[in-house]
Image: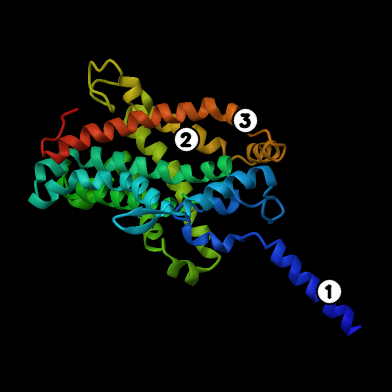
């Protein structure tokens, strides 16, 4: 009997060497911030990991392993993954970079005149980049870029908090700093978004994740609440998508006023981000990938992805346009 058990244990060990276990969700939890929806997205209806089938796994693992390789830079080796994450993550800091000159010189005219356009738009860009990670994982199966979720989440919180502080202390609205944040519907909603972003910012680290345990995932899902509140913030800010005189992202006489409305940009981007998260859609994508019909998946999602790119380009264009004026401390009047 002992010989049989020893043989079985030896065969089991050899099988483990040949077929190592797939990494579990705990291996990825530290990379998730603040869009904890990935925990739900990466798990099936029965609470078990979605099967990682060979055609999809082969390609995604090849890319992930290639990104772990090193490139020579200045006589030293740097991981391709590290270099790519630094380049992609640098865009998240761009809104704060635009505001640095006015902060160093304490130019209240620039801070009060453009902080909402620069940091507010920058917060929107970072939020969408953070929310984009889960659909990217779903469609490609790659995970090397997952750490960007936490970085974009942190930058979103920093931009949102900076926007609120600038509006409270340097805006033209009457009243105390707190009154400026609550006297209008859109400012009140924006203030609520910032309040929700603060605990996400504080707990966006491994230490907080270990201390909070399973409650950490629930807390991080407040990101979806912020995502929904952003719609009402932009709707009340811009007249529910209708240009009325100077009310809106564009100004009176702007030939592209509708496309410059941030509410329309929000809807164009959110359609793709939301659709890929719908469980039946995710199951359909997974089924087609199992069949090796990845091309069909990309053809199916291309229209809404193109709409996402279209709306996102307008948001980034506004950020660069307004941010450049903020950087030279000559805030735009648009």
Q: Position of residue 305 (x, y in %)?
A: 50, 30
Residue corresponding to mark 3: 295
Q: Position of residue 197 (x, y in %)?
A: 37, 54
Furthest residue to the right?
Answer: 1
Mark 3: give few (<14), some (14-19) or many (20+) Cα within 10 Å: few
Mark 2: give few (<14), some (14-19) or many (20+) Cα within 10 Å: many
Residue corresponding to mark 2: 270
Residue corresponding to mark 1: 8
Label 1: which secondary element: helix
Q: Position of residue 243 (x, y in %)?
A: 31, 21
Relative to 206, is 90 above or below?
Answer: above
- Calculate the distance from the C-alpha at mark 2 to the C-alpha at mark 3: 23 Å
- Which residue is more in the foreground, 17 or 187? 17
Viewer-nearest of discs 1 and 2 = 1
Residue 192 visible in image: no
- Which residue is more in the foreground, 234 or 125? 125
Residue 226 visible in image: yes
The answer to which image quadrant residue 20 occupies is: bottom right
Residue under the image location 39 percent in, 40 percent down? 230
- Calculate the distance from the C-alpha at mark 3 to the C-alpha at mark 1: 43 Å
Q: Quadrant of the C terminus?
A: top left
Label 3: which secondary element: helix
- Give the label on residue 307, or none: none
- Calculate the distance from the C-alpha at mark 1 to the C-alpha at mark 2: 53 Å
Look at the numbered discs 1 and 2 and tell me whether their residues touch, using CB distance below 8 Å.
no
Relative to 171, is 12 above or below?
Answer: below
């Amino acid at each position: 009997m002992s010989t049989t058990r020893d043989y079985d244990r030896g065969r089991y060990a050899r099988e483990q060497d040949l077929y190592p276990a797939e990494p579990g969700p705990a291996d990825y939890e530290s990379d998730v911030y603040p869009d904890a929806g990935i925990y739900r997205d990466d798990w099936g209806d029965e609470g078990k990991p979605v099967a990682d089938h060979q055609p999809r796994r082969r390609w995604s693992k090849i890319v992930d392993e290639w990104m772990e390789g090193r490139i020579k830079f200045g006589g030293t080796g740097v991981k391709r993954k590290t270099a790519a994450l630094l380049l992609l993550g640098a865009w998240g800091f761009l809104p704060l970079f635009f505001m640095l000159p006015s902060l160093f010189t304490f130019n209240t005219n620039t801070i009060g005149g453009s902080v909402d356009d620069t940091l507010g738009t920058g917060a929107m860009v970072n939020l969408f980049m953070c929310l984009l990670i889960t659909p990217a994982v779903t469609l490609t199966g790659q995970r090397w870029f997952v750490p960007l979720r936490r970085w974009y989440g942190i930058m979103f919180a920093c931009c949102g908090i900076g926007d609120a502080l600038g509006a409270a202390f340097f805006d033209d609205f009457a009243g105390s700093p707190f009154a400026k944040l609550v006297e209008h519907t859109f400012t009140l909603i924006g203030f609520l978004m910032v309040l929700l972003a603060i605990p996400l910012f504080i707990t966006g680290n491994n230490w907080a994740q270990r201390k909070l345990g399973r409650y950490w995932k629930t807390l991080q899902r407040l990101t979806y609440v912020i995502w929904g509140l952003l719609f009402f913030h932009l709707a009340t800010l811009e007249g529910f998508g209708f240009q009325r005189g100077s009310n809106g992202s564009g100004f009176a006489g702007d030939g592209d006023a509708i496309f410059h409305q941030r509410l329309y940009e929000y809807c164009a981007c959110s359609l793709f981000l939301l659709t890929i998260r719908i469980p039946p859609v995710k199951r359909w994508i997974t089924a087609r990938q199992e069949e090796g019909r990845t091309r069909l998946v990309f053809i199916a999602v291309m229209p809404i992805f193109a709409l996402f790119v279209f709306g996102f380009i307008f948001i980034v264009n506004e950020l660069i346009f307004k941010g450049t004026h903020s950087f030279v401390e000559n805030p735009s009047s648009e």
